[in-house]
Amino acid sequence: MKSLVFIALLAAAPALAQTPEPRTLSMAGHGEVKAVPDQVEITAGVTTGAATAAAALSANTARMQTVFAALQRLGVPEKNIQTANFSVSPQYTNGANNEPPRLTGYQVSNSVSVRLDDVSRLGGALDALVGAGANQMNGIGFSIKDPAPMLTEARVRAVADAKARAEAYARAAGVTLGPVLAISEGGNDMPRPVLRAAPMAFAAKAVPVAAGEESVSADVSIVWEIH
């Protein structure tokens, strides 16, 4: 009986070995969605100097209190204000004629990150911060509050792009697309700025700024069986 089973397996082996691998076509696709940002983050602060660390800190504290008061008048919620940096640094002269550096005073820097949920208020906020004594502007970043719907649409566009490319190649090669055998996603991008030619206009007396657009993209790779 064992011999009969062994002979049957040997007879079936060539048939199994001759099963052809399916012919396939692989194609990558890219999708991108752009939108006007709906929130912005400002990093601003105060840098002061004095002969002693205590004096520099006292001057900095007074000016930062004015900055915080300006933010409160703008109606910025406390949860949208976060300390970004604080430092106390000794200041030295450059040694001349081989003399060692000499301590001349201290510098105190204090900065905060402020998130505005209304981009149209950016110009007025910058004007108010500078008017309140902020002498350091370390960055402005635009973003989308909820990028998930944009990423979903970017993925749909990436799949459509891959399919359109695959169909073009299949027609040129004289074959037809069969079922999808595999699909994978490459690295997707979180919102990034894409500047537009025309700036957005804000309040007439506010600092002029351009919000531009944010872009979310997705990349996919799809494998089809072809006939």
Image (spheres, rainbow, N blue to C red):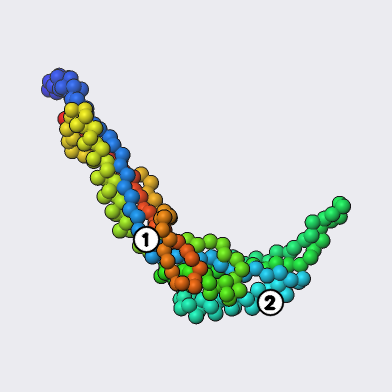
Total number of numbered discs in the rendering: 2
- Residue at 64% over, 78% down: 62
Q: Residue 166 location in percent, x, y?
A: 24, 36
**Camera-side residue: 133 or 149?**
133
Q: Residue 128 location in percent, x, y?
A: 53, 74
Determine the secondary structure under disc 2: helix
Q: Residue 193 location in percent, x, y?
A: 43, 55
Determine the secondary structure under disc 1: loop
Quadrant containing the N terminus in the rendered view: top left
**Could you tell whether 176 is left or right of 130 in the image?**
left
- Residue at 46% over, 76% down: 77
Quadrant containing the C terminus in the rendered view: top left
The crowd level at tag 1 (other Cα within 10 Å; few <14, some 14-19, many 20+) is: some
- Residue at 60% over, 66% down: 136
Mark 1 — residue?
Answer: 36
**Could you tell whether 217 is left or right of 121 in the image?**
left
Q: Which mark is residue 59?
A: none
The answer to which quarter of the image holds residue 46 is: bottom right
| Residue kind at label 2, given as amino acid type | Ser
- Residue at 57% over, 71% down: 130
Mark 2 — residue?
Answer: 58
Residue 59, visible in the rendered structure: yes
**Camera-side residue: 74 or 25?**
74
Residue 83, visible in the rendered structure: no
Q: Residue 116 location in percent, x, y?
A: 44, 70
| Residue kind at label 1, given as amino acid type | Val
